[in-house]
Amino acid sequence: MEILLTSSKPLIQLMAQKVHALIVGEVKSSGYFSVSDDSTPYLSYIGQLSVVLRHLNDGQTIEQFLTFLEMKVIPVRKWLIGCCGI
């Protein structure tokens, strides 16, 4: 299984680059777009920020996921201890 994942990783990366370029090209040609983001913290205190683009294509609104970005979240308990001594 590991050999399959290792050998297919370059192909997956290439496909992801092509899809990313296609989305960015569509957004650039539309003239109007908006960016939406949403974050989700996990128990490991590393959150994900998802980025979604909305744009017009032939008069229709298109919404496309662009990427996940990693966010480091400070645990509330650690923040309270550092900030307030609680």
Image (spheres, grey):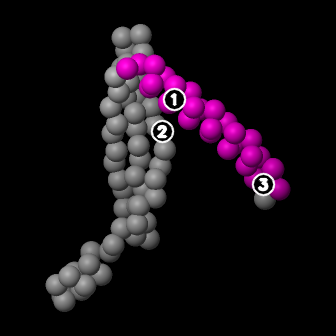
Instruction: Look at 41% across and 43% down and name the residue there.
Output: 51
Main secondary structure along the magenta-highlighted residues: helix
Horizontal side of residue 8 vs 26, given as left or right: right
How many residues crowd around disc 3 within 10 Å: few (fewer than 14), some, or many (20 or more)?
A: few
Earlier-in-chain disc, 2 versus 1: 1
Whether 5 is drawn above or below 77: the answer is above
User: Disc 2 marks which residue?
Assistant: 66
Question: In what element is the residue under mark 3?
Answer: helix
Measured along the vertical axis of the image, is residue 41 above or below residue 76?
Answer: above
Element type at mark 2: strand
Of tags 1 and 3, the one toward the viewer is 1
Check residue 39 in the rendering and tell me which mark sits there, or answer none. Answer: none
Query: Which quadrant is the N terminus positioned in?
Result: bottom right
Question: Number of labelled discs?
Answer: 3
User: Do labels 2 and 1 touch, CB within 8 Å?
Assistant: yes
> Does residue 42 show up?
no
Which residue was labeled with disc 1?
Answer: 23
Q: Is residue 55 magenta?
A: no
Amino acid type, callout 3? Thr
Whole-number angstrom distance, CA of label 1 to CA of label 3: 26 Å
Q: Say what amino acid the circle numbered 1 marks.
A: Ile
Residue found farthest to the top? 58
Residue 37 spot, x, y in % from top left: 34, 44
Q: Which residues are magenta?
A: 3-31
